[in-house]
Image (cartoon, rainbow, N blue to C red):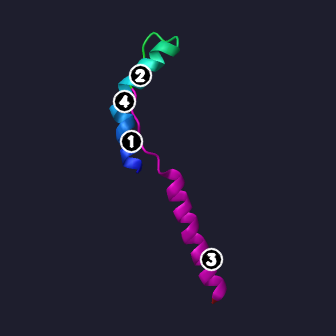
């Protein structure tokens, strides 16, 4: 699941940082932090709730 994928990203962030340093002309390579963004899922849930409410109002 998502947590397993995030664990892999966090575990391998040193690899990603090394690859960035190798491929980009940067003096300093930034530290990397991976954060799961659940914004889209929350928005979809909110849209479902609003549609359900709209359907309920329309049926009254």
Callout 3: SS: helix
What main secondary structure does the magenta stretch of the protein show? Answer: helix
Q: Residue at x 52, y 64 (%)?
A: 45
Upstream in sequence: badge 3 or badge 2: 2
Q: CA distance from mark 2 to mark 1?
A: 16 Å
Residue linked to disc 3 = 54
Is residue 25 positioned above or below 8 on the image? above
- Quick check: marks 2 and 1 in contact, CB under 8 Å? no
Residue 26 percent coordinates (x, y): 49, 12
Residue stretch rendered in magenta on the structure = 32-59
Nearest-to-viewer mark from 3 and 2: 2
User: In the current view of this chain or complex, which residue is farthest to the bottom?
Assistant: 60
Local crowd size for mark 4, using a 10 Å CA cut-off: few (<14), some (14–19), many (≥20):
few
Nearest-to-viewer mark from 3 and 1: 1
Residue linked to disc 4 = 12
- Quick check: marks 3 and 1 in contact, CB under 8 Å? no
Taking the magenta stretch, the answer to whether it contains residue 7 is: no
Residue linked to disc 2 = 17
Q: Residue at x 40, y 51 (%)?
A: 1
Callout 4: SS: loop
> Residue 14 or 29: which is nearer the viewer?
14
Which quadrant would residue 52 be assigned to in this image?
A: bottom right
Residue 53 percent coordinates (x, y): 58, 77
> Residue 18 or 45: which is nearer the viewer?
18
- Quick check: marks 3 and 2 in contact, CB under 8 Å? no
Q: CA distance from mark 3 to mark 4?
A: 45 Å
Residue 60 percent coordinates (x, y): 63, 90
């Amino acid at each position: 699941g998502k947590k397993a994928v995030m664990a892999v990203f966090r575990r391998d962030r040193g690899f990603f940082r090394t690859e960035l340093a190798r491929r980009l002309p940067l003096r300093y390579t930034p530290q990397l932090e991976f954060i799961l963004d659940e914004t889209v899922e929350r928005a979809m849930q909110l849209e479902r709730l609003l549609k359900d409410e709209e359907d309920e109002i329309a049926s009254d």
